[in-house]
Amino acid sequence: MRGPLRALWNSPLLGRYLRFRLALLIALPLAALGAAVAFTVGGLAGILLLSVLVFLGLVGLAVLVAVR
């Protein structure tokens, strides 16, 4: 028998809500970190550094999806 959390996670309405909350839990600190990097470094270097951080995050997600 599947666990209760897995059943809730896969339910249409509640699962969507839980995934949304998890995405916010991950995205908000990353956005704060990105803003701090952009404001601290500033200028073109800050934009490039932020772009590199976003690229590395996307590569990490791609690796997680590929492994899964």
Image: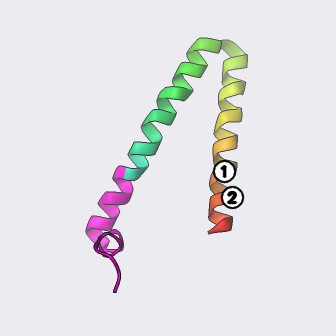
Going 65% across and 28% down the picture, which residue do you hit?
50
Image quarter for residue 25?
Answer: top left
Q: Callout 2: 10 Å neighbours few (<14), some, many (20+)?
A: few
In the image, residue 27 lies at what x, y percent? 46, 41
Tell whether 3 sits left or right of 57.
left
**Residue at the location (72% across, 26% down)?**
48
Gap in angstroms between the C-alphas marked 1 and 2: 5 Å
Specify start and end residues of the magenta stretch as a single range: 1-21
Q: Secondary structure at mark 2?
A: helix
Q: Total label count? A: 2
2 or 30: which is nearer to us? Answer: 2
Rendering coords of residue 15 (x, y %) = 32, 66
From the image, give the main secondary structure of the stretch colored magenta.
helix
* Residue 13 relative to residue 51: left or right: left
Look at 49% across and 32% down and name the residue there: 31
- The residue wearing badge 1 is 60
| Circles 1 and 2 in contact, beta carbons < 8 Å | yes
Q: Which residue is mark 2?
A: 63
Quarter of the image for residue 5 reads bottom left
- Which residue is situated farthest in the bottom direction here? 1
Please report the residue visible at 69 percent of the width from the left and 41 percent of the height from the top.
Answer: 55
43 above or below 67? above
Residue 1 percent across, percent down from the top left: 34, 86
Q: Amino acid at mark 1?
A: Gly
Seen in the image, is 60 located left or right of residue 19?
right
The three-letter code of the residue at mark 2 reads Val
- Check if residue 55 falls in the magenta segment: no
8 inside magenta stretch:
yes
Q: Which mark is residue 49?
A: none
| Element marked by disc 1 | helix
Query: Are there few (<14), some (14-19), or many (20+) residues within 10 Å of tag 1?
Result: few
